[in-house]
Amino acid sequence: MTPERIQIKLFRHSETDLKELIPTFHEWIRDETVDGLLIDVADYRHVPNGPGLLLMGHDGDYSVANDNGRTAIVYKHKRDWPSAELADRVNFALDRALNVASKLESDPINQIEISFPDRLNTPNTAETFEALAPTISTVASQALNTPIQFTHGSTDPRHMFALLSQPNQEIVPQAKI
Amino acid sequence: MSDLTWKDRLQNQIDPDSLQEIDLFENQITLKKQGKLDDKVFGETRLRRGAYGQRYDNGQRHNGAESVTIPFPSDGLTKGTETVWDAPGMQRIKIPYGGMNPEQLDLLAQVAEEYSDDILHITTRQDIQLHFVHLEDTPDLMRRLGSVGITTREACGNSVRNITGCPLAGVCRTEAFDVTPYADAMTWFLLGHDDVQDFGRKFKIAFSGCAHEACGLVTIHDLGFIARLENEQRVFDIFVGGGLGTVPHQAQLLAQSVPEDEILPVTQAVCRVFARLGEKKNRNRARLKFLVAKLGIDEFKKLVQEERTILPHDDRWTDYLKDVPEQVDQPLRAPTFLNGAPLPEGFSDWYTTNVYHQRQAGYTTVTINLPLGDISSPQAYALADIARKYVGESIRTTVEQNLVLRWVSEKDLPDLYRELDAVHLAAPGAGTVTDITSCPGTDTCKLGIAASRGLSGELRDRLIAQNGSLHPAVSDLKIKVSGCFNSCGQHHISDIGFFGNSRRRNNRAVPHFQVVLGGKWEDNGGSYGLAVGAVPSKRIPDVFNAITDRYVNEKEAEETFQNWIGRLGKKEIRTMLKPYMDVPVYEESPELYSDWGDPREYTIGDIGIGECAGEVVSLFAIEVARAEGEAFDALIELDEANYVTAEAKAYNAMVLAARALIRNEFIDIGDDPARIVTEFKTRFYDTKLFFDKYAKGKFGRYLLQRHDSPPAAEQVTEAVAHRLIEEANLFIEAAHACDARIAQARQNTLKPIL
Ligand code: SF4
């Protein structure tokens, strides 16, 4: 089965002032600046290394968080996929994540994490890694126009299955997005 | 990977009854989608599974400029009255007496990642809430929780809610005995019991190991149990009819020295009386506190006793008692003591506020101080591991929205601190002024009027920034914040409490908080504070500073905040607040017209912005100020123990507020209270113009009831006067809201002409 929820995390090497983003997120809802049905802003700045500032949507959520000195720009797609194929889904989620990253002025993206908050379909096992990693690597390399190799993220079976690119690889330079 | 569903995968790991109920709920979801279930029936079914509504679930949201329809794809499908199918909701999860183990915490973290926003939110009743959950995800979410022994059944709706209990039960130095097994037995005895299915409103139960501490908050509950030892026998004093909400009631003693084997049947008898005689039609009078007040405690006792004598015997009343002596936590590690080894930086502050020495020598209970009650999923995994390593099973949530780890061997504290600190869970200040309790407010609650979490976060940040320079008397204060008068943040039982409301200036709404002073946290929420004035939300931090600075300067040696407030008197407090209460026009201070953490111009519902920018003080504003003054005088009379005068002034305050509304339409109404009440009833109550969207006619009835049945002077006790003052304040708030609605309706009518 194909994962029903896919999360893309794009890392940048410095932190972001999340407070300044609050009005931006409200404007994005009002002006429908990013794709998806947007509902509200949720503020978790008080939780260290937590989800940060979220732009909650019906089909997917956007967020920007500070994560151990870095910024994580996140898109999690939750429902109403345009396709049932894994490759299409990853491509779709990546596209939304990159689109939102392009709207936030900051440093280049230097690491990417693709995770699957869907333990039913993608348990955090070596088998899942074997089965999914090649397709995802191909999709990501094409979408980002640069070869991306993924390693298996945390192998703790409680954690969601995640793929992590090499650190400090300049994946998407600022100029490009 | 396979095509298995969670239902297939977990069916052997869930108790069959729970499994069947969840399947049934899933079927009801399907039937509702097919249009085969009534909205009201499905709404209550959903609530009884803990799946609650959330802000904007009517499909409307004000975007700062106008109210717009959120284009949910559900195409008219609803999941309850005025509740759009696809709108995200809140899932409440029962954690009986706050107790859970690491496996459960892990699972909670997982479902938060998959179905929610990666956050577990601890509530003031020891539940856990997930927000932004889609209804169609809830059956699987419930199955997964069920696989580790957690239920959401009857977490919301007209049912027995999570049963709370002291987080220190079993390790407390001052408790009579450990109430955990009793709270546990009560939970499972009442869950789904036939006698608790026909209530008009929710029913909350709490257990406390002693009378003097706060942990159980028995006096604010419908039914509360305080443990006592009598001739070395375990007994409980049972209290009924407490509750906060709009008008708080202190619980009253139902029965003293009830033996342990009687608590389940007595509870069952109380439930039967409540189900039989409690109000069913009018939600606003349906809590047990109103039935107890209506019947009087003696009559209520008599009915419970009669019911108890005819209850058919049930073995479950006492079966659990044989296991009680064994139900004691087993520590994972041997008791030890700090041995003088070097301590990590920051340890001392944390040790002072977050570590409690258990009655078992060599063991401590550690509080994880969670900002606004939130913990992220990655933090929860880390905490589960830490618990496994140091304490085994023993994690609890608290009514102060924190978590505790019990049975930490003392010598482990430095290592534990380091590990907690590595995942940002070692914030000091548990139980101090920085550890602010807050309900969700306008962040997610559909009833929220002001941003309680926004305000709490702001106060917390400012107080933490002052750490080290805060006077000890201020450090010890309790702050609690609710987003509206419903008191989920328990503002009545704090030293300094706030609840959200709004005011209008020149057709613009301004978020405000009522300041509530002098409540008592100890003695299980021993007394309730009183509202002393509404202040614009953005000025609350300044008000807090003004009050606490003055307290520090003026307090006598050992004087508590509550006593100082009593000594200062409400009149002086009002004088102190007055400079903060006046609202400048938008053009002068636009920042006051939005709330904390939300840059949108503030609105209540769809109240818009007027076209006329001229400085006009409405007739209503002038008139209602008189009502507010009268209500305030009532407070002063109450302070001075002039209860009859206080009660009369509270009534008069309502009459004046009603008059303020009437004078907009009928300038010559005059001053005769009888005429004012008649006109109010005809023009505002019978027409429902005065009705609140959720509370309906509740606030209007405060005036009508008092007018129709004034108490005789000898009946006016302190409690009676106190209650009428609370009611008068709510009536005045409702008059403000009514005036705002009428103004908005007028504006909408004028728009096409303009
Ligand atoms: S107090 Fe009001 S705003 Fe806060 S959770 Fe309760 S109902 Fe909602």
Image (spheres, rainbow, N blue to C red):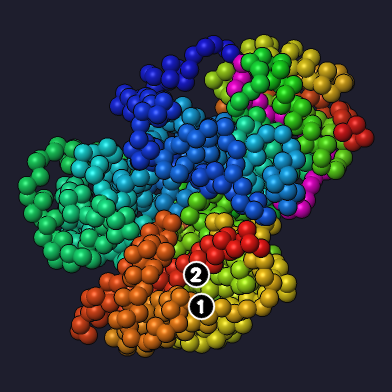
Residue B249, quarter of picture? bottom left
Residue labelled 1 has its Cβ within 8 Å of some atom of ligand 1: no
Which residue occupies 30% across, 42% down?
A: B187
Specify few, some or many for label 1: CA neighbours under 10 Å numbering under 14, 14-19, or 20 or more: some
Q: Amino acid at mark 2?
A: Asp
Q: Which residues are magenta?
A: A2-22
Which residue occupies 26% across, 48% down?
A: B199
B460 in magenta = no
Task: Locate the C terminus of chain B by quadrant.
Answer: bottom right
Q: Chain of mark 1?
A: B
Q: How many marks?
A: 2
Asked if B30 appears above or below B207 in the picture, the reply is: above
x, y percentage for residue B351? 57, 57
Residue at image mark 1? B620
Q: Amino acid at mark 1?
A: Phe
x, y percentage for residue B724? 33, 75
The residue nearer to you, when weighing B666 against B206, is B666
Which residue occupies 57% across, 32% down?
A: B73
* The disc label shown at residue B739, or none: 2
Task: Locate the N terminus of chain B by quadrant.
Answer: top right
